[in-house]
Structure formats: structure tokens, C-alpha cells
Amino acid sequence: MPKEGITPRAQDYSQWYLDIVRNADLADYAEVVRGCIVFKPTGYALWEAMQRGLDDRIKATGHTNAYFPLLIPKSFIMKEAEHVEGFAPELFEVTQIGTDKLAEPLVIRPTSETIIGYFYAKWIRSYRDLPLLINQWANVMRAEMRTRPFLRTAEFLWQEGHTVHVDEADAERETLMILHDVYADFVEKEMAVPVIKGLKTEKEKFPGALRSYCIEAMMQDGRALQAATSHNLGQNFARAFNITYTDQTNSVQTAWTTSWGISTRLIGALIMSHSDDEGLVVPPRLAPTQVVMVPIYKNDAERSAVMGAVERITAPWKGRLRFKIDDRDNLTPGFKYNEWEMKGVPVRVEVGPKDVEKGSVAVARRDMPGKAGKSFVPQAGLTEYLEELLATIQQNLYDRALQFRNDHTADVSNYDELKAQIERGFARAYWAGTTEDEKRIQDETRATIRCIPLEQPEAGGICVYTGKPATQLVIFGRSY
């Protein structure tokens, strides 16, 4: 039975998503700034947890953080032709400061390849300066007037890595290492969301890139969500901004660059991968609060006994579990249960007078609503029990999401099968078509090639659209 205030997923998936965002207190619309949202504390806490997990991985691979200007001279954007063509419709421009008109408009960054390229050209002189490995945590703006919280907003938060290398091979190693060791590792291990790692087609790649890679996840409505991208930019931006270095023979060489990013749309991915008609579901490894303790009492005498037990039970949790004690006296236990279920806290522990007498507690799992997920557990050894339970819940969420993706992915061999399958989820097909073929399929079905998986079968096949011999297997799907 769906919780009051939440539209069932099966009835209206889009409204269900918006209901989760509102009722779990994740965000609010910024009506006074069209296309933007406010990250409320609960939603921002998720982003902070994501930042920590990603930042640790980024730094572990040898990168350091810096910060570059929000405003970029428009002439910088114009220097890389393919880049400007891709971003021109999305740009916000500043043309006046106070009463003074600017001689050159400034663009609010849609991404920072250009401004960072300008500074890299100043900083790099020799091969000894390479590789240059810098990451930035920032906000960006792109014209997006049809807002869907976290998924599509005019302003969003992200990290963007920008690196410089001596040759294509080193740039390619960087691009794939970020995809595998940072992005896919984080999304699968911390968010419990299985992903497909792949190469973008020429039609879908980042404007100005040599090659674009991505990780694609399936949401509970069968649609794809691009969770992260990593781009080998080749020498395009290096040429545009004259990023050169002197090699070991004292010859001047053009550098190779990469860029890669992941954004707050991960919060949207989290909601749509795991949540249910009861509210938000957050994987334990990512959850800002893993366990909430709810004491139950009716009078001062019971309160004294129960709170004494709570203090004793939770003492070993410090430094081992992220927990809260909800001892608000003005709210009923039922209200508290509802609130913490809505906000997706993985485990709830309840202690009342009878539990104190019996030396037990009631434990409720958020991934299994209702009686199926509730059990009575001895207080002795409870800390270890909860640690094991959190690990079990984490794995269960991943396995459940993976099973859903497998159940909603099918091989197709002709165009009619392709059109039928994308109504359910992902269509896996051989491909030997052109960019024009891709565009026609998108126009007719609203589906795109999400990626060319890095893991490919040894044998070839027949193109799903042209009927020609094909060597590449691709994933088609509708996306967010």
C-alpha cells in the first residue's frame, strides 16, 4: 500500500519521483530563479556523502583540487568550433556590470575546458610539467527551463576533472582509469547501482572530444540515466588554447587533454534506482544516517529506563555506525517511523519498556517494508549484528537493481523488435549504421544508442537497422 502523499510508481512514475523529492524533503523549486532548485539539508547531505566518496577516489589516483573562475570570456568559448556549436543554445551571458556595458560578454560556465585551457597554456612549459592532474568542485549553468529536480536544472553542482598529457596513450589511460576506478567503482560500490561502461557514438559524444566514455544505469521505469562521462579530448582544446610543451629532444609538442565529470543528477539516479512507494531508499554505505534509534515510553519512569538503555546500547556505535537518536517528545513513535522511512534511513531500531526488560530491540529494514523486514534481536552483540545487516542491505539493493536491469534488457535482431523492446527497457543490438541512421531512429522512437559497451562479444552479427554485417554490439534505450 503506497504511503499517503506518494503516487504509486505503476500509476505515474514521473509524479512518483516528484513526490519522493518533496516528501523526503530533498529539494524545493526556486520559483524566483527559473529552472533552478534549492537543495534542502536532507538532499544536500546526500550530495556531501557523494562528494566525500568521489573526492577520496579522485585524490587516491593522484589528482589535486583547484578552483577556476565562474565567468568565462565569450571569445574563449568560440575558439573550439565543435564545442561552441554544442553549447551555444545553453549559454547564459553577462553583458553588463552595474550601468557599464562590457566590451566582451562573459559566459557563466557551462563547463570549464576553455577557461582551464587558457591557464594550462600559461603553466605548462616542459614534459616535466606533465601529466597535470587537476579536479574542480563547482557549479555550472546551462539553459534548462523544463526542470526536473536533480536530473535537469539550469544550475547544478558537479566535479570536473581536467588533465594534460604527453601523448594520446597517456590521455586514453587517464580517461579509462577515471571511468573504471573512480566513477563505476563509486556508483556500484557506494550507490549500489549497476552500470554499463561504454563508448559514446560520434553523434552522442561530448562536443569537441576525440572520444567520450560513459557509465549508463537503468532506472525502475526502464529508462537509461547517464551517470558520468569521461572524455579523451585529443588535441582539439590544446590547439585552440596553444597548450604545448617542450619534449626531451627540445622540440615543441602539442599536448593531449582529458575532461571528466559527475553531477548532482546522481541523486536522481539514487532515487529512481532504489526507492519505493513508501519513500526514499538510501544504500547504507552512502547514507548520512545509517541507523535511527527510536525510544518508546509513556511516562517519566519509562523514559528514564528506556533512555538509560538507549545510552548503553548506542555507546559502542560511536565511530562504527552513523546514527541518530530520535528522542523528540512532541512526536509519536508512529510519526517518527513514517518520517525516517520516507527519508530512506536503512535501519530503524526501536526500544520500549518491554524491550528493556527482555534485553532485546526491534529492528526494521528499510529495503524490506512492513512485517517482512522487522525482527526482534538481542541487545547483546547488537552492534555487530547491525554492521552485518547494513552490509546485507547494501548487497541486496545492488542485486535487486541488477536483476531488474537483466530482466528488462533483451537482444533484438530487427527494427520491429527494437521498437518493442525499448518500451520495456534496454535493447541490445548489433550496429553498423551511420549518424544519420541514429538520428532517424531517435526521431521515430525517442531512443538513442546509450553506449557501445566496452565488453564486446567475440563474434559479429547483423545490424539491427541496415541489415549489414556488424562487429559492434550497442545498447539502445530512452533516457533522462
Image (cartoon, rainbow, N blue to C red):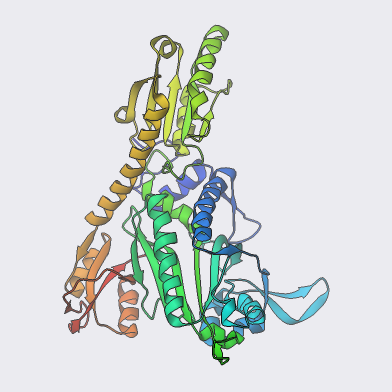
| Residue 226 in view in this figure | no
Q: Is residue 74 positioned above or below 284 on the image? A: below
**Quadrant position of the C terminus in the picture:** bottom left
Q: Is residue 324 positioned above or below 116 on the image? A: above
Q: Is residue 401 positioned above or below 459 on the image? A: above
Viewer-nearest residue: 373 or 190: 190
Judged left or right of residue 86, residue 357 is left
- Percent position (x, y) of residue 315? 52, 24
Residue at the image position 59 percent from the left and 59 percent from the top: 36
- Percent position (x, y) of residue 81? 54, 87
Residue at the image position 22 percent from the left and 65 percent from the top: 420
Residue at the image position 23 percent from the left and 68 percent from the top: 428
Q: Residue 387 falls in which quadrant of the image?
A: top left
Residue at the image position 41 percent from the left and 65 percent from the top: 179
Q: Is residue 116 positioned above or below 469 on the image? A: above
Q: Residue furthest top?
A: 301
Viewer-nearest residue: 226 or 358: 358
- Percent position (x, y) of residue 191? 41, 50
**Quadrant position of the N terminus in the picture:** top left
- Percent position (x, y) of residue 106? 69, 76
